């Protein structure tokens, strides 16, 4: 009877050690990075760009401006990262501006200034693969989607036919969209970590995306715990 009681106490010690030594992995973000932009050739400013991480807007930029307005704080070198992104994205919108002016005569007149809206998104899936796509539309209505990983165009509304004919026939434009969304965006995604709004505790300054070492922590941390428990059970048994 005494041995059984001691064994029960040993089991309790094992569970206590499990509680003390077990450190659950920090929740990882489902990282996605996207940019929405508006190009209005005759507008002031003529283009606006917003950046979003996991659906949360973190910056706003207007073409011609020397500063970017950071809306939320990310764990990143904002100046260095955005400087690289700005140059690439501004080149994209400049090329889209030329495209818009080329087809302006074929677009039905509207009451307001002609504008092109677009978005660029790259997202890391659970299997580690990255998807990338772009969307375009005229005067506020998205009408064309381009999967830059597969090269497939999808017309969503009638206006998308003209956009597809123009963009899909421009080899240089296709290369630019693929390079920026599937190449550059994927690299930028590694530089930008989770925004504050994804954190459970609002008082936390920033959050971090687990590194490879952190990702492996659940496995490596369990092994010492199992070993210690086995030793204790062996001693007490």
Image: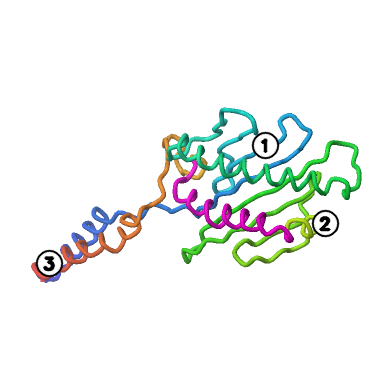
Position of residue 150 relative to residue 118, above or below, is below
Q: Quadrant location of the C terminus?
A: bottom left
Q: Is residue 131 magenta?
A: no
Where disc 3 sits, the SS reads helix
Residue positioned 23% across, 57% down in the render: 16
Provide the residue designation for mark 2: 162
Residue positioned 78% across, 46% down in the render: 100
**Considering only order in the chain, which callout, 2 or 3, is on the residue closer to the N terminus?**
2
Callout in the foreground (3, 2): 2
Does 109 sit left or right of 162 as displayed? right
Residue 8 position within the rendered picture, expressed as x and y whole percent measured from the top left? 18, 66
CA gap, disc 3 and disc 1: 63 Å
Position of residue 143 relative to residue 149, above or below, is above
Q: Main secondary structure of the magenta part?
A: helix
Residue 198 position within the rendered picture, expressed as x and y whole percent measured from the top left? 50, 45
User: Is there CB contact under 8 Å for labels 2 and 1?
Assistant: no
Does 23 sit left or right of 149 as displayed? left
Residue positioned 51% across, 38% down in the render: 82
> Toward the viewer: 110 or 90?
90
Residue positioned 67% across, 54% down in the render: 173
Callout in the foreground (3, 1): 1
Q: Quadrant location of the N terminus?
A: bottom left
Q: Which residues are magenta?
A: 168-195
**Disc marking residue 231:** 3
Where disc 1 sits, the SS reads strand
Provide the residue designation for mark 1: 48
**Considering only order in the chain, which callout, 1 or 2, is on the residue closer to the N terminus?**
1
Residue 28 position within the rendered picture, expressed as x and y whole percent measured from the top left? 43, 54
CA gap, disc 3 and disc 2: 72 Å
């Amino acid at each position: 009877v005494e041995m059984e009681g001691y064994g029960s106490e040993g089991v309790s010690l094992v569970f206590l050690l499990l509680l003390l030594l077990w450190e659950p992995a920090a929740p990882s973000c489902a990282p996605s990075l996207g940019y929405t932009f508006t190009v209005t050739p005759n507008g002031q400013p003529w283009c606006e760009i917003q950046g979003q991480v996991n659906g949360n807007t973190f910056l706003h930029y207007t073409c011609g401006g020397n500063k970017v307005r950071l809306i939320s704080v990310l764990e990143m070198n904002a100046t260095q990262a955005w400087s690289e992104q700005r140059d690439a994205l501004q080149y994209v919108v400049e090329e889209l501006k030329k495209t818009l002016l080329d087809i302006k005569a074929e677009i039905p007149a509207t009451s307001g200034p002609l504008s092109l809206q677009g978005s660029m998104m790259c997202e890391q899936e659970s299997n580690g693969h990255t998807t990338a796509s772009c969307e375009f539309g005229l005067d506020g209505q998205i009408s064309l989607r381009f999967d830059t990983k597969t090269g497939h165009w999808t017309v969503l509304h009638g206006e998308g036919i003209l956009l597809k004919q123009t963009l899909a026939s421009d080899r240089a434009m296709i290369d630019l969209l693929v390079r920026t969304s599937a190449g550059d965006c994927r690299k930028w995604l590694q530089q930008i970590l989770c925004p504050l709004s994804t954190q459970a505790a609002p008082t936390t300054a920033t959050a971090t995306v687990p590194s490879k070492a952190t990702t492996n922590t659940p496995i490596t941390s369990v092994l010492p715990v199992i070993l210690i428990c086995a030793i204790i059970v062996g001693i007490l048994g």
